């Protein structure tokens, strides 16, 4: 990109990279461009790479040495950058994580309402990190006096009990239309992509088991897609839009976990308009200071 960055570009980089106002100011003074920051987000395979916010603070510390540098002390600028995270920055990161979780919960609840309107769904249950209290992320390294934000949810895990597997394509379209409607209603809120929804299909009243895991809902436009590696798994596509994953075994204990939330049950409570979630715990991460013996 050759054009000068606009306020919209910086706002997007701030949201995607989870930066504070101070870190955006530092990035501008260091001469960084917003699109270069988004490209520097570490992937799950780049565990050696610092988050963008810590990288900006480390570069800032190198170019603006404090009194410790002037006195000749050997202080790692990366360690200094991480240890100087402000409480305001951490609160902002926590609010972003809780805001995303609330948005994902709203999507799950609205899917529960859709499920209550069709006769071939008996039950819908939410489990996983969206339904639970968010813990603090564990640090990759033992930084001195470091504190880390709340864990950010990635997927909406839903277990759905269906009586007719031939309606999976209809269910796929219903969820897609719902997510588009949510993005139109609240365009400034975090979006919920279709691939963030993991729908575990349970066949209700199976001939051998009362509840039996059959597979996941496939989000591809047609089934099977022979140009996709996932569609080459044995058994995948035998039932249209029922995804089978290689070497995957469903853990039935997940749907019976005490933190799992029932969103719809035709036989008992019906559609739950206001589900009860566990309260968010005020967790703090305590890190042992690094000693000379480490």
Image (cartoon, rainbow, N blue to C red):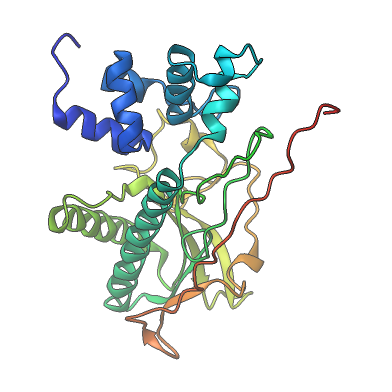
Q: At which x and y percent is residue 39?
A: 36, 21
Query: Quadrant of the image for the C terminus?
Result: top right
Of 36 and 24, the residue lying toward us: 24
Of 290 and 110, the residue lying toward us: 290
Query: Quadrant of the image for the N terminus?
Result: top left
- Is residue 155 found left or right of 142 in the rendered image? left
Q: Quadrant of residue 31?
A: top left
Q: At 39% across and 48% down in the image, what residue appears?
A: 196
In this rendering, is residue 211 above or below 174? below
Q: Quadrant of residue 44?
A: top right
Q: At 57% across and 15% down in the image, what residue appears?
A: 69
Residue 46 in view, yes or no: no
- Is residue 243 found left or right of 283 in the rendered image? left
Q: At which x and y percent is residue 108?
A: 36, 65
Q: At which x and y percent is residue 47?
A: 59, 26
Q: Quadrant of residue 24?
A: top left
Q: At which x and y percent is residue 123?
A: 44, 77
Q: Which residue of the protein is positioned furthest toward the bottom in this rendering? A: 268
Of 126 and 123, the residue lying toward us: 126
- Is residue 179 found left or right of 155 in the rendered image? left
- Is residue 290 found left or right of 218 in the rendered image? right
Q: Which residue of the protein is positioned furthest toward the top in this rendering? A: 2
In this rendering, is residue 294 above or below 275? above
How many labels were placed on the picture?
A: 0
Residue 102 in view, yes or no: yes
Q: At 38% across and 54% down in the image, what residue appears?
A: 95
């Amino acid at each position: 990109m050759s054009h000068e960055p606009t306020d919209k570009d910086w706002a997007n980089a701030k949201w995607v990279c989870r930066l504070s106002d101070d870190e955006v100011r530092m990035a501008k003074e260091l001469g960084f461009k917003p699109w270069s920051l988004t490209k520097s987000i570490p992937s799950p395979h780049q565990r050696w790479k610092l988050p963008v916010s810590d990288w900006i603070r480390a570069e800032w510390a190198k170019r603006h040495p404090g009194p410790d540098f002037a006195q000749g002390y050997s202080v790692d600028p990366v360690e200094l950058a991480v240890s100087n995270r402000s409480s305001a920055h951490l609160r902002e990161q926590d609010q972003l994580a809780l805001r995303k979780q609330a948005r994902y919960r709203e999507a799950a609840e609205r899917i529960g309402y859709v499920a209550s309107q069709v006769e071939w769904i008996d039950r819908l249950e939410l489990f996983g990190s969206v339904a639970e209290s968010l813990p603090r992320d564990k640090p990759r390294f033992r930084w001195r006096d470091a504190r880390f934000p709340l864990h950010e949810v990635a997927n909406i895990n839903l277990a759905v009990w269906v009586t007719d597997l031939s309606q999976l394509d209809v269910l796929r379209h219903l969820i897609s239309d719902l997510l588009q409607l949510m993005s139109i209603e609240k365009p400034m809120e975090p979006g919920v992509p279709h691939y963030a929804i993991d729908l575990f299909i349970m066949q209700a009243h199976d001939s051998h088991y009362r509840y039996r895991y059959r597979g996941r809902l496939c989000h591809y436009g047609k089934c099977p897609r022979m140009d996709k590696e996932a569609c080459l798994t044995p058994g995948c596509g035998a039932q249209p839009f029922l995804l089978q994953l290689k070497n995957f075994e469903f853990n039935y204990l997940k749907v019976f976990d005490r933190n799992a939330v029932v969103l719809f049950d035709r036989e008992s409570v019906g559609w739950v308009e206001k589900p009860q979630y566990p309260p968010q715990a005020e967790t703090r991460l305590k890190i042992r200071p690094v000693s000379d013996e480490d």
